[in-house]
Structures are given as structure tokens and as C-alpha cells.
Amino acid sequence: MIAAYLEIRNGKIKKSSLEALSEARRLAGELGVGTAAVLVGAAVADLAPGAFALGAAKVYLIEDRVLADYSAQAFAIALAGFAAEAKPAALFFADTAMGKDLAPRVAARLGVALATDCTKVAVKDGTFVFTRPIYAGKAFLSLRLKSSPQLATLRPNVFPLGESVDGSGEAIRVQSAIPEG
């Protein structure tokens, strides 16, 4: 499965996260695997239908009162726990301020590599090829990650939103082991 972390701001899923989910869905179709979304917060179950509408077959809900407000450490613990348990092939984040803060922390907890600020993701010989700008956008670097799961942040407003589908899926509650404080 290919998963996307869905960032929530003011009770709504951010558009850039929905773009990351749409790209996950496109790539999952190429590889013939499922698509999943991950929602983290105190009470996020009501947002699951938005992920189902963009093709997520599963929505993982990591709900805990400790996660009511964003904390890089708490969210990283929750997402690393999800990745260790669910074992997605890839986990995508939007390249927003939160994504830039959270993705490296999750990668460090999992001991895996991270591709940042990606403007293109392709599948070649059954593996992902991530493309990102370098030298202030004057050149592009294409790279493959050897670790699993493959983590990447996707640049907002580059990947198109997928078409809405009339679908539902499975909402899976994931227990978090986040200590108070």
C-alpha cells in the first residue's frame, strides 16, 4: 500500500495533503497496490469521508487527546508506530511547514531515507524515482531510495487533485503509545 499523511488545519484537510493522496492513488494504480490515508489528532474520524472520496481504500485514524495540538515529537511517534505496524511501501507528506518538520522526524525514528520537495514521482522497474529541483531550480535531481518504507514530501500545487469517486472504505483505528507531556 501507498499511504499519505493528511494534514489538518482548522478542522479541514489541507489541499496540499489531498494532492499527496491523489499522487499516492495514481502510483498505487500503476503498481497494483492499495491506497491509504493517515489522520492524526484528537477527534479526526469525521474527516475520513474526504479521504475516501479521493480513492483511499483505508483510512488509518490515530486519535488521542494528547494529539489535539500539533507536537512534532508526538506526531512523529504516532506516524512511526503506524508505519511500523501497517508497513506501507511508501508514505507521502505535503511539503508544507508541518510536513518539512514532521517527515524527517518520522524518517529518523524509522531509520529510513527521505526524499524532500519532490516535483515528480515515477515508477521505473517497480521502484519509485523521485525528482526534485536543485541549484535554485536550475537543475533537477532524480533519485531512488533503498530503504523501506520510502518517505517523501511532495511540493504543493504541483500534483493535480484526483477525480472524486463515489466510494467508501475501511476506517482503522490505530492505538498510539504517546506519553503525556
Image (cartoon, rainbow, N blue to C red):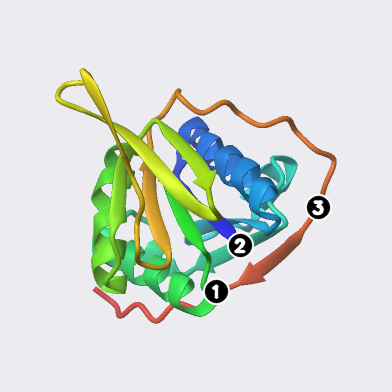
Q: CA distance from mark 3 to mark 2?
A: 17 Å
The residue shown at (16%, 21%) is: 136
Q: In the rendered image, is residue 98 in sight?
A: no
**Label 2: how many residues lie within 10 Å, few (<14), some (14-19) or many (20+)?**
many
The three-letter amino acid code for the residue at tag 1 is: Ala
Residue 27 occupies which quadrant of the picture? top right
* Residue 116 placement: quadrant: top left
Q: Mark 1 — residue?
A: 86
- Identify residue for label 3: 168
Q: CA distance from mark 1 to mark 3?
A: 20 Å
Q: Quarter of the image for the C terminus: give it.
A: bottom left
Q: Toward the viewer: 140 or 149?
A: 140
Figure check: 52 above or below 96 = below
Answer whether residue 7 is visible to the viewer in this image.
yes
Tell me the crowding category of disc 3: few under 14, some 14 to 19, or many 20 or more residues within 10 angstroms, Cα based.
Answer: some
SS category of the residue bearing label 3 = loop
Picture disc at residue 1: 2
Q: Which residue is farthest top? A: 138
**Where does residue 81 sit, x and y in percent of width and height?**
42, 75
Q: Earlier in the sequence, mark 1 or mark 3?
A: 1
Q: Amino acid at mark 3?
A: Ser
From the viewer's side, name the closer residue of 104 and 39.
104
